[in-house]
Image: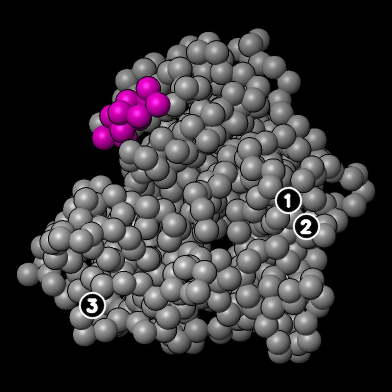
Amino acid sequence: MTATHRPGTAPVRSGSLAAIPFVERSVGAVLERAARIRPDDVFFVHDGVEHTVAAVNAQVDVVADGLRAHGVGTGTRVGLLMATSPEYLYGWFALAKIGAVEVPINTAYRGELLRHQLERAQVELVIADRGGLHDAVEVVRAEVPTLTGTLDFPGRYSDLLDGPQSDGTSREAGPDPSDVACVLYTSGTTGPSKGVLVTHHQQVAFGHFFAEITGLGASDVVLNYSPFFHISGKFTTLGCLLTGATMILRSRLSIERFWDEARRYGITVFVAIGGVCHMLHGRAPRPDDADNPVRVVYAVPAPAEIYRDFEARFGLKLVEAYGSTETNLIVNSSLAESLPGACGRPNPAFDVRVVDDAGNDVPDGESGEVVVSSDDPLLLSLGYDGLPDATATAWRGGRFHTGDRAVRDASGALWFKDRMKDTIRRRGENISSYEVERLVNGHTAVAESAAVGAPSELGEEEVRVVVVLRDGAEATPEDLYLHYAQTMPYHMVPRFIDIVDELPRTPTDKVEKYKLRTSGIGAATWDAADSGWRMTRDGPVRTT
């Protein structure tokens, strides 16, 4: 699919984005514009230190000059494997100004998954935090033909940060808003993860729509703890930059200390991904629960079962949106209306439809696949990197086919029903069952496996695997769990494990996963939590 901007048809005519000429709707240009208009405003606060827009812009220019000196130019693909930090932000915006292509990498990736992403994206340079992340790149470096160098932080990347003040003489013309800003990897569904080609305009528009949905303004203070390899970390940052809101930048969210920190920093808006609302609601009630500065929580999803109670208990408003990296925030609720259980109403910048298998609109009240298009095609991604067939399959008939099933009611609200794709949704992150199975099958005792989602007490799902052992092999579920805790990204490690003699199959030998989902957790299912284990970013921890 090729997307071209058609002047005069762009449907975004309101809010912060409407005031920005199209030629300035690139990530770097938005920062430069903000630095000209309000240089002394605080862009973000990190570890108690305020960073003004002008100071951030100046630091980004220094990094950009340093990257150019390392051979980074227009179109160069640079992987960023770093924790959420100012240093990541500087690299992200520096690449945007150069016109290079950022490849954000999940910090949990190691081994085969890391190699696959670096090779598929044809990454030439990686910037990685020193220690485990940089070491992980070095392990697979020889297997990635395009990778010619790495910069570690602290280390050689620090030298770029400490470089001389930029005088602007080495600058080239900035990228066009239609150029690719980053290759942002999905979590995969029926195959390996796919890199989504996100343009500058789409990325900036993500921030704009987030700001519109939450009513973001210059007086707001927004908590951003989402990783920058996730679109939510990016649109939260860009929403603040577009509106003048101040961002509190953190690498992690503390449920235990959240409300105290919200009061300390004056947080008015934050994004609650996955089970965050459930976890906050699960804390013991306090008399001062409603005595906090938060006015709106952007929840994905907003938990219908505790929606009203959550709002009343904490004295705030819940909003949510439906979308994807391939599309944008295409459906959303609003500050003026509460629709517990519904995604909201279509964003007027998009044509969102619910269709049957033939592509025809289904009547209200009937389920179908969600498809989307826009008069401004650059609000959507350009397709999948290096995968023309997958791109053509997803973008057909002039629409992007989401693979998600929903129902539109008589009022026009959209109600998400399920995923037609084979993916597991755990705490705000889509996990590819294909990749889970590939890693699970790497154990020498495992002949084959099937990964499915299992209901979680925090909402959404936990990872469950059903395993068939090789003939004569012996392994307990706990043996497998502890092995996978060392070989898989922490968020993919299965909480539930079943060992069975065979998997249910169709006459054509395909695994009938719906039967595994329907049968659910049984008496023979091993549960890591019930067995006294808790998986953390640093490995498994005994709870009993």
Location of mark 1 (residue):
392
Residue 290 belongs to the span the image colors magenta? no
Q: Is residue 345 left or right of residue 520?
A: right
Q: Which mark is residue 407?
A: none
Q: CA distance from mark 3 to mark 1?
A: 40 Å
Q: Are marks 2 and 1 in contact (CB under 8 Å)?
A: yes
Compared with 491, 202 (above or below) is above
- Residue where numbered disc 3 is placed: 525
Residue 247: x and y in percent read 49, 49
What's drawn in magenta, residue-wise?
132-143
Q: CA distance from mark 2 to mark 3?
A: 41 Å
Mark 2: few, some, or many residues within 10 Å (few <14, many ≥20)?
few
Please state which of residues 348 and 146 is positioned toward the viewer in this rendering: 146
The spot of residue 533 in percent (x, y) is 15, 65
Q: How many other residues sit within 10 Å of disc 1, few (<14), some (14-19) or many (≥20)?
A: some
Asked whether residue 253 appears in the rendered view, the answer is no
Q: Is residue 242 left or right of residue 396?
A: left
Helix, strand or loop: magenta stretch: helix
Badge 1 amino acid: Ala
Q: Amino acid at mark 2?
A: Arg
In the depicted structure, whether residue 43 falls above or below residue 154: below
Q: What residue is shown with label 2?
A: 396
Judged from the image, the secondary structure of the residue bearing numbered disc 1 is helix
Which residue shows up at 18% across the image and 66% down it? 477
Q: CA distance from mark 2 to mark 1?
A: 6 Å
Judge whether 541 appears above or below 227 on screen.
below
- Specify whether 61 is left or right of 331: left
Residue drawn at (51%, 53%) of the image: 191
